[in-house]
Image (cartoon, grey):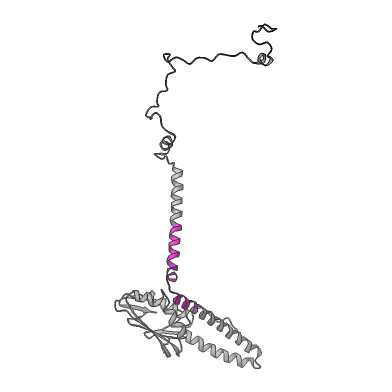
Amino acid sequence: MSSEDGTPGTSGNPLRRELPEEVAAQAPAGAGEPGPPAAAPEPGGAPGLTGRQRLVKGLWPPRVSRAQLIVALLLFGLGFGLAVQVASTSDDDGALRGARQEDLVRILDELDDRTQRLEEEKQGLEDQRTELENSSDQAEEARKQTVEKERQLGILAGTVAAQGPGITLTVDDGKGTVESDMLLDAVQELRAAGAEAIQVNGVRIVAGTYLTDVGGGVAVDGNKISSPYRFKVIGKPQDLEPALNIPGGVVQTLEKEQATVTVDRVGKIVVDALRPAKQPDYARSSSR
């Protein structure tokens, strides 16, 4: 049966008329027909590489530029510096970290004692100022304070003898391993603990004292002394002795050098080694 426009098989079906003409599917090429030629493998390459193998092949051997090498060296140097700094900080804190609870409590007590001494000194100066301001005879009060101050400065300068409670420190260096810097550490620790007068083997220790190594011993301000080193120290024994025995402190350092260290509290210490008063060459009093 034919449709009105003469197209067979489409009458009565308007949708059919709108569809394009069907195209018959082409039959696949026969087995005997030659196919397109296969792509030749790249020279030196292995055919059929997986994605992971191609990635590894692209990354190795590494191709490093000069700029990348410089950046890597800079980063390495920065990391090494940070590691050294952290290790140094850990070494400084190692003595406290490894200390026992009793030692830490003693260190804190020593710091509290130092703070208290500074507060007492501050209060004493304030009291002197108040006395000067309130005294009816300010000239006489000023003279008394001047005399007292001169006596105190004479003790510190080593020009006058002194006596009072304190400790004795004896360092027997039988091996000859104790050096001047170790004795200087002892002097500094004693000063920090409130020592007011110090002498060692008959030589007075003052603010300008220096210690050097000489053959067979140590020189204090050019005066040679030898082992055993005997320190006479005037101050509060309850502060001086613990300051020497703190973990990693003077006593432990000297004992590591195989020296024998003895610290004794004494009710009365006499420091009678004197230093001549030195007239300054250039400094003059500014008071008129």
Q: Is residue 41 left or right of residue 113?
A: left
Residue furthest right in the image: 4
The percent position of residue 72, horizontal first and vertical second, equals: 44, 48
Question: With respect to residue 185, does 135 lie above or below?
Answer: below
Q: Quadrant of residue 261?
A: bottom left
Quarter placement of the C terminus: bottom right
Predominant secondary structure, magenta span:
helix
Nearer to the camera, 61 or 65: 61
Residue furthest left in the image: 175
Is residue 106 inside the magenta stretch? yes
Question: With respect to residue 176, does 269 lie above or below?
Answer: below
The percent position of residue 247, horizontal first and vertical second, equals: 42, 75
Quarter placement of the N terminus: top right
| Residue bounds of the magenta highlight | 81-108
The percent position of residue 86, horizontal first and vertical second, equals: 45, 61
Q: Is residue 137 left or right of residue 100?
A: right
Instruction: State the count of labels.
Output: 0
Q: Residue at x 49, y 77 (%)?
A: 108
Residue 86: in sight, yes or no? Answer: yes
Nearer to the camera, 9 or 188: 9
Q: Quadrant of residue 81?
A: bottom left
Residue 277: in sight, yes or no? Answer: no
Q: Residue at x 36, y 76 (%)?
A: 254
Is residue 21 inside the magenta stretch? no
Q: Residue at x 44, y 65 (%)?
A: 90
The percent position of residue 200, horizontal first and vertical second, equals: 38, 83
Q: Residue at x 43, y 49 (%)?
A: 73
